Image (tube, rainbow, N blue to C red):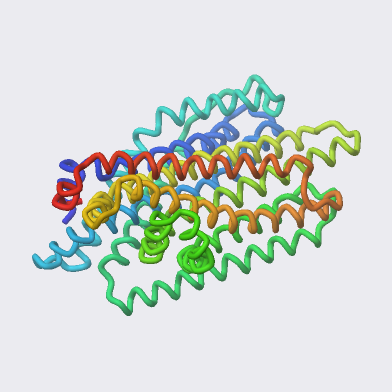
């Protein structure tokens, strides 16, 4: 089956483009920041510079591991779901579920290793640029030289490979499992979701046990907001169905036939669309919470008349770097998942057109679907972010929301909306160029 996996990758490289891109970016990010560990451990590096570099690598490396897994998992899940017919034919030909798992996991391993190898060069350049930024801000001494060593290579390649293999195994197990197995996986998913929500609530609550001057004050609410966002992401299919029940009548009344098609299509595709909601919820929650908490911290420092210390600069730089990583990864996850999912619906679009729907109505359906997904993801992401922002603000300076908070939130929403609508509408418009009869006839 591994030989079959190699042939599948070689003869159909386009299918694995999204996964390769996610693996490449994930490995590049991990190697870039973990090279700070190699740099900090070099001889002649002073203690202050080493502490700054180690802190950056540890914090961003932790966030990066989670984001890499979600990015690769979302693209691989869509890939495996689109191959349901192929997997069914292989099973009919005598392939066992274990053989299919080895094939898909082998494909994922090959793509992950290719992505990691391609990421080495960009990661070296990125590490040098990151070190230069720290030196320009005065957080790292000028005589420190960048080192790209075994920690960067092993962490980047290892994390990407483990994430790819694990996500592929779970995806193909879901595709080939029986009803009882799917029910048990649903229980595991619900348990993981509730565990994340409980951990998030604990993190937010722990903020109130700290003092306003504590150096790690931002850690607890940030962790709480992230875990709440992860919990909402796990529950994205039922949350989407519940919201569709509330929005069915107003959406249909406002958008007509496109809204009617949207509601019914999304109800049947709630599980598949959860791959889009996950990055939306994570992006909105984490980006809003991190940026607003940093704004509260900056406002509190200005109000006290104090200048920013090296530690304050370190924290501010870390927050902005983490948000930058989240933006890139979330956009990649959204674009990959939406492009793969929308392009796979070419036959569905053709069937709708043969049933009487016009191309404009189909395109309108995709647009309304994107808006509903954006509203759902932004809503639950904002709830998660607000929990961390409010707890941090109350402890730090008795404020619930920074003065520039509305502008930050609107910027986050604008990025999420643009990534969702541009990708989905652009892909659907391209798919509609295929004549309806041919779209229905071809195998997607």
Q: In this view, does 349 lie above or below 323?
A: below
Q: Which residue is drawn at 50% across and 40% down?
A: 418
Q: In front here: 134 or 93? A: 93
* Residue 176, image x, y percentages: 25, 68
Q: Residue furthest top?
A: 143
Q: Residue at x 50, y 28 (%)?
A: 126
Q: In front here: 170 or 92? A: 92
Q: In front here: 169 or 193? A: 193
Quarter-of-image position of residue 167: bottom left
Q: Is residue 69 visible to us here?
A: no
Q: Which residue is drawn at 69% across and 61% down?
A: 203
* Residue 339, image x, y percentages: 35, 44
* Residue 123, image x, y percentages: 46, 31
* Residue 162, image x, y percentages: 39, 52
**Horizontal relation, residue 94 to residue 406: left or right:** left
Number of marks drawn:
0
Q: Is residue 394 visible to us here?
A: yes
Q: In front here: 109 or 431? A: 431
Q: Which residue is drawn at 52% across and 65% down?
A: 243
């Amino acid at each position: 089956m591994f030989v079959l996996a190699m042939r599948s990758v070689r003869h159909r490289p386009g299918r694995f483009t999204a996964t390769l891109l996610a693996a490449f970016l994930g490995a590049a990010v991990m190697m870039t920041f973990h090279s700070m560990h190699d740099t900090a451990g070099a001889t002649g590096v002073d203690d202050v510079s080493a502490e700054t570099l180690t802190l950056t690598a540890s914090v961003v490396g932790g966030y990066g591991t989670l984001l890499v897994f979600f990015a690769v998992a979302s693209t691989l899940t869509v890939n495996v779901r689109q191959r349901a017919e192929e997997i069914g034919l292989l099973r009919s030909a005598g392939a066992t579920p274990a053989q299919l798992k080895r094939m898909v996991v082998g494909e994922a391993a090959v793509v992950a290793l290719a992505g990691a190898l391609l990421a080495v060069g960009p990661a070296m350049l990125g590490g040098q640029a990151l070190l230069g930024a720290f030196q320009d801000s005065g957080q790292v001494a000028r005589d420190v030289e960048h080192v790209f060593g075994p920690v960067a290579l092993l962490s980047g390649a290892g994390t990407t490979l483990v994430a790819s293999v694990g996500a592929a195994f779970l995806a193909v197990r879901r595709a080939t499992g029986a009803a009882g197995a799917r029910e048990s996986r649903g229980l595991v998913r619900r348990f993981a979701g509730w565990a994340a929500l409980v951990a998030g609530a604990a993190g937010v609550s722990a903020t109130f046990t700290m003092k306003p001057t504590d150096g790690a004050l931002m850690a607890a609410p940030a962790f709480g907001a992230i875990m709440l966002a992860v919990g909402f992401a796990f529950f994205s299919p039922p949350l989407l169905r519940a919201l569709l029940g509330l929005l069915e009548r107003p959406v249909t009344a406002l958008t007509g036939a496109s809204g009617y098609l949207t509601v019914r299509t999304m109800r049947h595709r709630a599980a598949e669309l959860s791959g889009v909601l996950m990055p939306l919820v994570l992006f909105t929650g984490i980006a809003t919470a991190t940026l607003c908490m940093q704004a509260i911290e900056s406002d509190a420092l200005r109000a006290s008349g104090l200048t920013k210390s090296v530690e304050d600069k370190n924290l501010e730089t870390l927050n902005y770097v983490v948000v930058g990583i989240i933006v890139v990864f979330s956009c990649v996850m959204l674009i990959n998942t939406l492009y793969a999912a929308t392009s796979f619906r070419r036959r569905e679009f053709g069937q709708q057109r043969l049933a009487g729907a016009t191309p404009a109505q189909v395109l309108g359906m995709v647009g309304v679907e994107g808006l509903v997904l954006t509203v759902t993801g932004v809503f639950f992401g904002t709830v998660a972010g607000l929990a961390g922002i409010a707890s941090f603000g109350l402890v730090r300076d008795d404020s619930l929301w920074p003065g520039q908070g509305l502008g930050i939130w609107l910027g986050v929403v604008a990025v999420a909306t643009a990534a969702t609508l541009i990708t989905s509408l652009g892909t659907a418009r391209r798919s509609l160029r295929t004549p309806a009869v041919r779209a229905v006839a071809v195998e997607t």
